[in-house]
Image: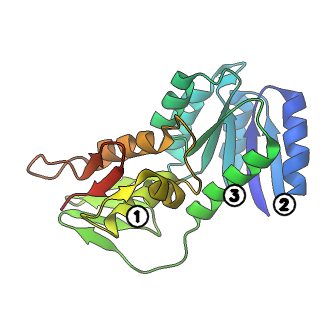
């Protein structure tokens, strides 16, 4: 049974989602503000977090920053009642693995959670990927660039693995979304682009300044050798 930390100040929504998710096999702990959420995280790290953007004692985005510093590979799904594109972009830029607008369908939230949890527990493999000065361990979610280690989020890890396994070969966005996010992209969905942007910032360009990950307009991406 996967332990889930649900952080939202809407207690009725928490009760609804907790009831549904419990029936789906999750063990849910609900917190209604940032302070209690930080304490819960200090007590024991859950398998995944569902985090609202708006909290009574601060911004959920600020809490996400702290989460990424303390638990870089912990799967996080953001919720927002406003559903503003800026909220979505900021959440993904700060390292959220997925994002849903409220009110959300509990079935869709369940599907998103299962997808990020599957991606956070890849099939065991001893394979270490190496391209030039970049070495990546899919099992650890750790990439080494010029001998400097960096920790990736679940989505970034899956994205980099997909690109490194087919270097120089373009992968279209829908194919990458299935591999990295575990779902298809919807209309105007820029989730994949934001994860690529975050990954690019972390791993940087090649030593000669060329980008490691190249975009093909309206098509997809590939890892440049």
Q: Is residue 83 above or below residue 113?
A: above
Say which element carries label 2.
loop
Instruction: Specify which label sits upstream in the sequence, 3 or 1.
Output: 3
The percent position of residue 78, horizontal first and vertical second, equals 63, 36
Instruction: Specify which label sits upstream in the sequence, 3 or 2.
Output: 2
The label shown at residue 6 is: none
Say which element carries label 3.
helix
Q: Which residue is mark 2?
A: 25
Front-most of residues 63 and 159: 159
Say which element carries label 1.
helix
Q: Is residue 62 above or below residue 49?
A: above
Residue extending furthest toward the left: 208
Question: Of circles 3 and 2, which is in front?
Answer: 3
Q: CA distance from mark 3 to mark 2?
A: 11 Å
Q: Which residue is mark 3?
A: 114
Q: Is residue 28 above or below residue 142?
A: above
Residue extending furthest toward the bottom: 126
Q: CA distance from mark 3 to mark 1?
A: 19 Å
Q: Looking at the rendering, which quadrant does residue 148 occupy?
A: bottom left
Which residue corresponds to the image point at 26% horizontal and 70% vertical from the top-left?
130
Front-most of residues 174 and 55: 174
């Amino acid at each position: 049974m996967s332990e889930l930390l649900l952080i939202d100040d809407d207690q009725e929504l928490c009760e609804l989602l907790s009831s549904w998710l419990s029936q789906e096999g999750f063990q849910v702990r609900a917190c209604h503000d940032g302070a209690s959420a930080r304490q819960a995280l200090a007590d024991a790290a859950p398998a995944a977090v569902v985090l609202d953007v708006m909290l009574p004692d601060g911004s959920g985005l600020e809490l996400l920053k702290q989460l990424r510093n303390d638990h870089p590979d912990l799967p996080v799904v953001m919720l927002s009642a406003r559903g503003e594109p800026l909220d979505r972009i900021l959440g993904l830029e700060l390292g959220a693995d997925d994002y849903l607008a409220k009110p959300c369908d509990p079935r869709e939230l369940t599907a998103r959670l299962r997808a990020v949890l599957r991606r956070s527990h890849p099939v065991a493999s001893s394979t270490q990927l190496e391209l030039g000065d970049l070495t990546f361990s899919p099992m650890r979610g750790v990439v080494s660039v010029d001998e400097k280690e960096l920790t990736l989020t679940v989505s970034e890890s899956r994205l980099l693995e997909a690109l490194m396994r087919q270097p120089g070969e373009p992968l279209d966005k829908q194919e990458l979304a299935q591999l990295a996010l575990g779902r298809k992209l919807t209309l105007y969905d820029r989730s994949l682009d934001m994860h690529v942007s975050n990954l690019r910032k972390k791993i940087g360009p090649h030593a000669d300044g060329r980008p490691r990950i190249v975009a093909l307009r309206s098509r997809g991406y590939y890892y440049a050798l």
